[in-house]
Image (spheres, helix red, strand yellow):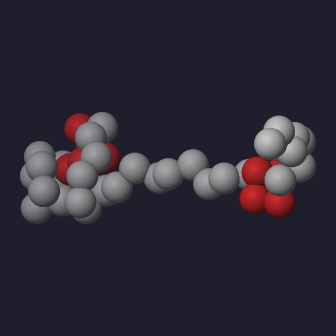
Amino acid sequence: MGKGDKKTKRGKIYRGTFGVRRPKIKKKPSIEQKIGIGNKAQPK
């Protein structure tokens, strides 16, 4: 349990990897995309 342990969060941070214990933070959609500013109407 520590830096050398691949399965712990601290070990993931030390190695610079991601997994179940240290998931990648997903980029949140911006407010403009949510409310649709700048989106043109689709032609029919």
Q: Given the current orientation, which residue lies at the most extreme front position?
A: 44
> Residue at (28%, 46%) from the top-left corner?
18
Provide residue 8's location: percent of width, then percent of height: 18, 59
Q: How many marks?
A: 0
Task: In the rendered view, tell whether residue 41 sits above or below residue 35.
Answer: above
* Quadrant of image for the C terminus: top right
Provide residue 12's location: percent of width, then percent of height: 24, 48
Q: In which quarter of the image is residue 21?
A: bottom left
Q: Is residue 29 left or right of residue 38?
A: left
Q: Quadrant of residue 2?
A: bottom left
* Quadrant of image for the N terminus: bottom left
Task: In the rendered view, tell whether residue 8 sits above or below residue 18.
Answer: below
Residue nearest the viewer, comparing 10 with 39: 39
Q: In this view, does 38 lie to the left or right of 18?
A: right
Q: In this view, does 13 lie to the left or right of 37?
A: left
Q: Is residue 6 visible?
A: yes
Provide residue 5's location: percent of width, then percent of height: 10, 52
Residue nearest the viewer, comparing 41 with 43: 43
Q: Is residue 28 left or right of residue 17?
A: right
> Residue at (50%, 51%) from the top-left corner?
26
> Residue at (30%, 38%) from the top-left corner?
16
Provide residue 15's location: percent of width, then percent of height: 23, 38
Q: Is residue 31 visible?
A: no
